Amino acid sequence: MDVIHIVGAGGIGCAVGYALCNSGLSVLFVDADAAKIEWGRRHGVAVDDLPPRQAAFVAVDDWQPPAGAVVLLCTKCYNNAAVLERIPASATLIPIQNGFDPLLHARGHAVEGIASFVSECLPHRTHTRITRAGWLHFGYRLSARTSSFSREPQVSARLFALACGSRLNRKIRVEIVEDILPYKYTKLMYNAAISPLASAAGIDNGRLLRLPCARALFFDLLRENYAILKHAGIALGKVGPFHPSTVAAILRRPWLAHALAWAFYPSLRGTYCSMSGDLPAGRTEIDYYNGHLLELAGATPCPLNRCVYDLIKRMERGRLVPHLDLLAELNRDPARPSTNCYAVS
């Protein structure tokens, strides 16, 4: 079988690539990190404590995919432009990335994936840890769909090969869905609440649930994200234990929401969103997360999203150091306590 090109040897790229190697497919990893490429050539790709698998590695500057190549795009959205320039129109492009990029949308690809598991790659290495189990959904973007899975054997064969090879310590389950967008928008609903708040505060995802004021902001932003998507008439899918409509109902019952926050805290403790690593460098995916929600909202009031977006953009421009106190300026609801509850350890 032809080589499958994976652009971006980060947490998602390494996890998916490892699964493909396990299923007997040839994989070529493409990345801009020279140290990571050298590590991969020496040690292969690895997930958790599973045995490493051999694969090919190449620098993005030296990569030129052939006509008809199958390319899994696992980069950050802000890297898409440079990568898409290298991919021929005849390639089968399958993005697996968070966020909504107009440039990628204009490409008109038919199939897309979205990961709800959390995978954190070690710096400069092709070795990742699955820190939170979850799903990997694959499906059509119905707006670009031209035929059924059974009538696209090349794409579907690779997807089902991935499905068979992706059971990594039972931490990842793969599901083929009819329409990928409801699942991608649900993931956006969560990412656009967790990522900017945890990143601006400089805390892990667990502390976002543990600290009272941070948790209250997270709940408020999650509610606002859900309201924007519902008002825009966007269907949502289930990527976690609860459907978004159930999550919205839970958030209307504060005692239940806080109780469940403590239930989820242990699995999120010590995990970080990708925006946390990007913010100190002055470049994040905020335009593709909250920026996209603001576009969907239009004239509909969404004050917390606008404040969050403005805060992250200001931190990007000024290279501001993440700190819990930065969340205080988002806490503009007079009904909330005015005490400095962000100082809780």
Image: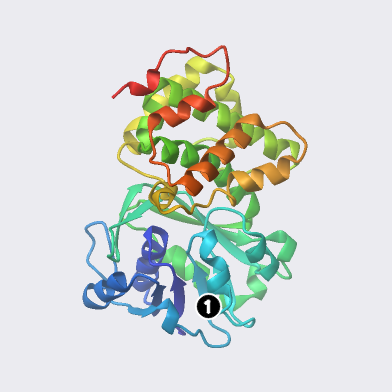
Query: Does 238 appear above or below 69?
Result: above
**Which residue matches tag 1?**
70
**Looking at the image, which is closer to me, 149 or 280?**
280
Q: Position of residue 68 (x, y in %)?
A: 58, 85
Q: Position of residue 256 (x, y in %)?
A: 49, 19
- Please tell me which residue is depicted at 55% across the width and 80% down the height of the picture: 86
Query: Seen in the image, is 29 located left or right of residue 253?
Result: left
Q: Quadrant of residue 206?
A: top left
Residue farthest front in this picture: 318
Query: Does 235 appear above or below 109?
Result: above
Query: Seen in the image, is 282 located left or right of residue 266?
Result: right
Q: Quadrant of residue 145?
A: bottom right
- Please tell me which residue is depicted at 38% across the width and 41% down the height of the picture: 321
Which quarter of the figure is the N terminus placed in?
bottom left
Query: Seen in the image, is 320 located left or right of residue 305?
Result: left
Query: Does 337 appear above or below 45?
Result: above
Element class at badge 1: strand
Which quarter of the figure is the C terminus placed in?
top left
- Please tell me which residue is depicted at 65% across the width and 65% down the height of the picture: 103
- Please tell me which residue is depicted at 57% across the width and 53% down the height of the picture: 99
Q: Position of residue 289 (x, y in %)?
A: 58, 47
**Looking at the image, which is closer to me, 194 or 336?**
336
Dot 1 surroundings within 10 Å: few (below 14), some, or many (20 or more)? many
Query: Does 315 appear above or below 23?
Result: above
The three-letter code of the residue at mark 1 reads Val
- Residue 25 in view in this figure: no
Q: Position of residue 23 (x, y in %)?
A: 38, 72
